Amino acid sequence: MRTSLRFASACAAALLITPAVGLAHFKLLEPASAIVENERGDPQKAEPCGGDGKGPGTPSGVVNKATGGSKIHLKVMETIYHPGHYRVALAVNDRTELPQDPVTTTRETEKGPYSTWAVIQSPAQLPVIADGLFPHYKRPAAPQTFETDVELPNISCERCTLQIIQFMAEHGYNKPGGYSYHHCADFQITADTSKPLDKGWPAAAAK
């Protein structure tokens, strides 16, 4: 935890001298998104899985399949740059199980509060399975793609929700959405019977 706090503090100090940037967007490329996204990844402001102030977006109807205890490939494109990092969480039965957006530190500006950093879980605590992914604080020449493999818990569920959020530093408060943008992917996970089940996760309800 001390390492993550030192990292966050250093990022915050660097951002205090960084000109504010207005917008940020990301598109979920892998796994398949739970909603239909446009070329920018919109709609993505509202918690917990995107949408906007008018509604949660149009469902894609895609349910990804995976084996518990295995790794899935995560790939996002930041269609409009903004400094920050990403977090991944999993809800077994209902999206209300997803955690709140990370606690964020802000500074006051003429335009109101702007984010400087957010708490990074190290190690990640259920239902978060990965945090502090893809930290970036320098504007790229072109839209940037980030990808990695993320390990799922060894559990079974008919329709889990994998949530990917982008924390945005040096950003004003969005209504809805706060200081994060949100996407989700629906999953059917089947536990690997050759491995012990992971403890601590809610039991999957029969559907």
Image (spheres, grey):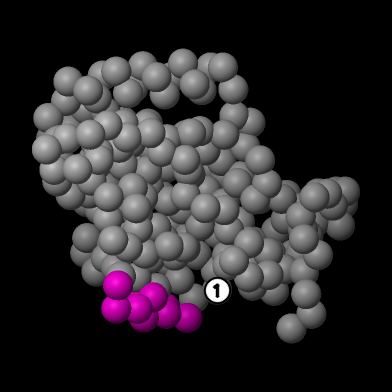
Q: Is residue 145 left or right of residue 191?
A: left
Mostly what secondary structure, the magenta segment?
Answer: loop
Report the number of numbered marks: 1
Instruction: Tell me the residue at 33%/47% (across/down).
Output: 179
The secondary element bearing badge 1 is classed as strand
Please identify the residue farthest to the bottom as the structure is shown.
207
The answer to whether residue 164 is seen in the rendering is yes
What is the magenta range?
53-61
Residue type (three-letter) at the residue carrying disc 1: Val
Residue 197 in percent (x, y) is at 84, 52
Against 121, residue 199 (above or below) is below
Task: Find residue 107 and report its horizontal and vertical position in percent.
Answer: 27, 32
To which quarter of the image does residue 86 belong?
top left
Q: Quadrant of the C terminus?
A: bottom right
Please give the residue where the numbered disc 1 appears in the rendered image: 63
Image location (x, y in percent) of residue 190: 74, 64
